[in-house]
Structure formats: C-alpha cells, structure tokens
Amino acid sequence: MPPLPRCPPPQPDNGVLGFLAGPLEVALNGIEGALEAAGVPYAYGFAIIALTCGVKALTWPLSQKQVESTIALQVLQPKIKELQAKYGGNQEQLQLETAKLYREAEVNPLAGCLPTLVTLPVWIGLYRALTNAADEGLLADGFFWLPTLSGPVSIADREGGSGLSWLFPFVDGAPPIGWDDARAYLLLPVLLIVSQYASQKIISPQQSDDPSQKQAQAILQFLPLMLGWFSLNVPSGLTLYWLVNNALTTAQQVVLRTTLKPKIEAELNAKVQAIENKTKPVVLSEAERLLKEERKGGSGKGKEMGARKKKGDKFKARKEAQKAKKEAAQENGSRRKAEPAQAEAAPVEAEVVAEDQ
C-alpha cells in the first residue's frame, strides 16, 4: 500500500487582514534571520522592535496629517465657542455658521479620521503577524530579563479561557510558574501601564469645560489598566510590541506638534482675522461719506449733496466779499477823520517854531 500523501500544515486564519499579516510576518522572520546571522543577541526581540519602527516610519505622513488636523481644530476652538454662545438656541444656524467657518478657514474637521482608518489595519495586521509567530513557536527566545517571548501564556491558553493560569491560583503560596518567572513577566505589563499614562499626560489636549470632553477623558483614564490586563493574557512578545509602539507614538506626536504647531497657528490666526475683518461693518467719516456719495454719479442724493456743497461755497465767497468791503469802508472813514486834525495842528506847529527862533 503506497504511503498517504502528507497534508500541508494548516495555514493561520488572518481574517480579512490576511493580505497584511502575511507580508508582515515574512518581514519579521527576515529581520530576525538577518540579526541572528549578524550575531545579535535576542534577535527576535530586536526584530519586533525593528519592524515596529519600520511600520511607524512608513505611516509617518498619515500621522502628520492627523496631527495637523488636530492642531487646526484646537486653534479654531475659541471661535467655535463664540458661535455656540451666539447661536446656542438655534442648532441649525449654529451648524451652518460652523461649516462656514471651516470652509473659509480651509479646515476639514474629518481630515484626522482618514489617517487613523488607514493606519489601524496596518497595526492590526502587525498584531496578527506576531500572533502567528507565537502560535508557530517562533517566539521561544528570551529577551533580557524575559525567560521567553512566547510566555507566560500561549494564544491557545488565552482562547481557551485560561489566560491567567500562569499567575492564579497560587500553589504553595506562589504562582504556578514560580515567583522568579512571574516577576519577570509582570515587569513588562507594569512598564506598559506607566508608559501609557505618561503618553496620555503628554499628548492629550488640555482640560475642557465641555461635559462630553470630560466624560471622554474620564474613560481614557482606564485605558492603561485595560492594556495592562490584556498584556497579562498574551505572549510577552505582543506586550513588547505594544510598549515599543506606545513609546514611538508619543515621541512622534511630540516632534510633530513642536514643529507644526507654530506655523499652523500663525496661518489660521491670520485667516480668522481676515474673516473677522470681512464681516465687521465699515464706519466712514463724514467727509468720506460725502465723497463716496459724490462718486456714485447718477444718484439723486449724490447730486443733491453736490448742489448743497456748491451753494455753501457761494455763500462763503459772498460772506468774504462783504467782509472785505466793510473793512475797506472803515479804512476810508478813518482817513477822512485824520485829515482835518492834521490841518488844525499845522498852524500851531508853525507858531511854536517862530517863538523858538
């Protein structure tokens, strides 16, 4: 009887993201092989770090778009609050004015969503690639203080509902794997929780008085604890990936905000000022108003104002002529009075001169 053909090993089910998980797993194995050939210790751990850094570098432009959108919305927030205070009782008008503000400021409030939607499948695919590596026993190497990157729990144990069987219940006052290994594996989740809290503190927006914002911020306070809980139920290689990705994301956000925020704030403030100047009513002086009305040409009111001005000029000229005539008459009268007085004074002067002789 001829031997039966050997069945190929079962292929991992990567779901709809299999087209991403497969190439990422190949890249991970390739990096690990290159590092191991170069004699680098803890090759698989450093391969995880290198692949995470590479994916983060490839998604940098998308992250930049997301940060630009976030900064733009923060700059426009005071103006939006003014609109809310002005049109709070008319939601339809408020939406129209808000949309008009976004349009005139050339800001798309949904621009930050698209980069997130694009990068999310990439990171899920990387997660699936690491999960497949753990299932295939490729994470058997240790990493510094970690006994193995596949411990303390396998994916099969986690899916079977016994993800914490390595920690509970205690046997003779100690975890099933012993205190030494338990402390080694617990250190990575603790670092993940601390880094996540630090990340939220650094990159989260300032406290807002908006009730919805306060509720969202309160929910986010529990996110680090949730990640810490998940990391207790997966191989430590995945926890290492989460920790490195979290640190890279925080550093990326800090660099982008530091470099982009001054420029975006200056541009948007100039646009907002231009919008305010355009909507502000123009107050003209009386002379400017008259000049503007005269330039209209063909306007009855403009002609009337021009006629009034001409009439006023004629009246002013007549007044000046009368004043000049009056001054001339007064000057002539003064001369006539002075001539008799001079005639009477002449004989007296002559007598005085004779006596002196």
Image (spheres, helix red, strand yellow):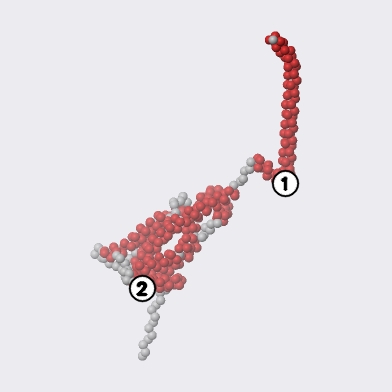
Q: Secondary structure at mark 2?
A: helix
Mark earlier in primary sequence (1, 2): 2
Q: Residue 155 occupies which quadrant of the picture?
A: bottom left
Amino acid marked by disc 1: Gly
Question: Tag on residue 221?
Answer: none
For disc 2, the neighbor class at 10 Å (few under 14, some 14 to 19, many from 20) is some
In the picture as drawn, the residue positioned furthest to the top comes out as 355
Q: Which residue is mark 1?
A: 297
Q: Which residue is mark 2?
A: 33
Amino acid marked by disc 2: Gly
Residue 33, image x and y in percent?
A: 36, 73
- Which quadrant does the C terminus fall into? top right
Q: Residue at x 68, y 42 (%)?
A: 290
Q: Residue at x 46, y 71 (%)?
A: 16
Q: Is residue 106 visible?
A: yes
Cβ atoms under marks 1 and 2 closer than 8 Å: no
Q: Residue at x 72, y 38 (%)?
A: 309
User: Which residue is nearer to you in this view: 37 or 93?
Assistant: 37
Residue 352, image x and y in percent?
A: 70, 11
For disc 1, the neighbor class at 10 Å (few under 14, some 14 to 19, many from 20) is few
In the picture as drawn, the residue positioned furthest to the front comes out as 357
- Which quadrant does the N terminus fall into? bottom left
